[in-house]
Image: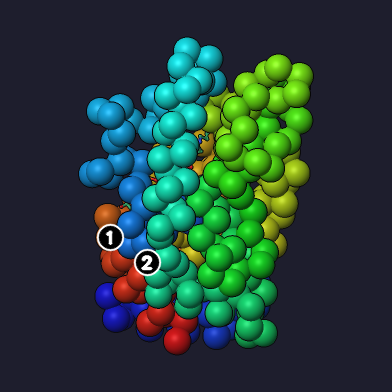
């Protein structure tokens, strides 16, 4: 692992703009279950079975409980050493760093990253499933219009927020190096951003204990909390 880390440290010396693309593995060492790893199930069902408009229409209360359960886990969670190293680096002046994340937990923001694009929305806001009106009080269940309130995350089968998508494409396209941390890269169109960068000849560095990409330039087989602090020190 140290050979690869030294190679990437070299690469970082000669670039200015870095895109950091993250998935659920980025938050695993903060105690937040990943989607497809062990412990990612809830009441015997996979998140993919909860994170859909159909599940919400079928059993809105259960889906609401699923998200309240996840909010509780995230509230208890603390950013780990990898989050903090990333937050510190991204707010420094050595590089221009923007984070494009599939995660909805807000841990990048809690650890000091200020330029974060949340491709799949956020656990920490909700809106009316009928009229779209946002509601900041997460305890409320219904909109004044009578519609049910839902978490402002992107469910399977739903389009991604267009402005966030456009900005994320810009970040990847403008970057001189992409760090891909903790994603199985199976969810589209998000995962397509990594392929787009690789296709444009931008070096892609993967950090994952179980590497998932086939287009990476360098692969560091390790966890986010282990690797990021060493890489960025
Ligand atoms: C769309 C928010 C079209 C919700 C998420 C049929 C119908 C419609 C669409 C489709 C379809 N079939 C396929 C699709 C496309 C679908 C898709 O890609 N499905 C996959 C499953 C095949 N995509 C969609 O539906 C998207 N929308 O296509 O809409 C459209 C267009 C216009 C208009 C209308 C419609 C929407 C996808 C977004 C879904 N929402 N999350 C919520 O959170 O509840 S996706 C969800 O998966 C999370 O965001 C998660 O981040 C993401 C990806 O997973 P990963 O982050 O990679 O996590 P995973 O558990 O998979 O992997 C963890 C990784 O970490 C592993 O590699 C592991 O090795 C590593 N790891 C573990 N520990 C560590 C670690 N790494 C580092 N350190 C560690 N310690």
**Residue 229 at x, y percent in the picture:** 41, 79
Q: Nearer the viewer, mark 2 or mark 1?
A: 2
Distance from mark 1 CB to nearest ligand 1 atom below 8 Å: yes
At mark 2, the secondary structure is: helix
At mark 1, the secondary structure is: loop
Q: Which mark is residue 209?
A: 1
Q: In the rendered view, does 178 fall on the left or right side of 226?
A: right
Q: Residue furthest top?
A: 58
Q: Which mark is residue 35?
A: none
Q: In this picture, is 63 found above or below 218? A: above
- Residue at image location 76% in from the left, 30% down from the top: 133
Distance from mark 2 CB to nearest ligand 1 atom below 8 Å: yes
Give the quarter of the figure containing the N terminus: bottom left
- Residue at image location 38% in from the left, 33% down from the top: 47
- Residue 200 visible here: no
**Residue 62 at x, y percent in the picture:** 42, 24
Q: Nearer the viewer, residue 140 or 165?
A: 140
Label 2 – label 1 distance at C-alpha:
9 Å
Q: How many marks?
A: 2
Q: Nearer the viewer, residue 117 or 16?
A: 117
* Mark 1 neighbour density, 10 Å: few (under 14) some (14–19) many (20 or more): some
Q: Which mark is residue 224?
A: 2
Q: Nearer the viewer, residue 98 or 45?
A: 45
- Residue at image location 58% in from the left, 37% down from the top: 139
Q: In this picture, is 134 found above or below 214? A: above
């Amino acid at each position: 692992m140290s050979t690869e880390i030294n190679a990437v440290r070299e690469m970082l010396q000669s670039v200015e703009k870095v895109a950091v693309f993250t998935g659920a593995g980025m938050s695993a060492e903060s105690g937040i279950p990943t989607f497809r790893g062990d412990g990612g199930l809830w009441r015997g069902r996979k998140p993919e079975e909860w994170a859909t408009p159909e599940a919400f229409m079928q059993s809105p209360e259960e889906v609401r409980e699923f998200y309240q359960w996840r909010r509780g886990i995230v509230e208890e969670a603390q950013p780990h050493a990898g989050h903090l190293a990333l937050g510190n680096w991204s707010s420094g002046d050595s590089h221009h760093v923007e984070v494009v994340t599939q995660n909805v937990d807000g841990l990048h923001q809690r650890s000091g990253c200020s330029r974060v694009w949340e491709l799949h929305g956020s656990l920490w806001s909700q809106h009316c499933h009928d009229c779209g009106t946002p509601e900041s009080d997460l305890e409320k269940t219904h909109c004044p219009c009578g519609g049910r309130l839902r978490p402002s995350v992107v469910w399977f089968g739903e389009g991604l927020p267009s402005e966030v998508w456009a900005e994320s494409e810009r970040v990847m396209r403008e970057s001189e190096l992409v760090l891909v941390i903790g994603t199985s890269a199976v969810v589209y169109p998000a995962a397509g951003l990594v392929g787009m960068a690789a296709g444009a000849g931008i070096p892609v560095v993967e950090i994952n204990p179980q590497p998932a990409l086939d287009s990476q330039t360098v692969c560091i087989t390790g966890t986010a909390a282990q690797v990021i602090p060493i890489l960025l020190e």
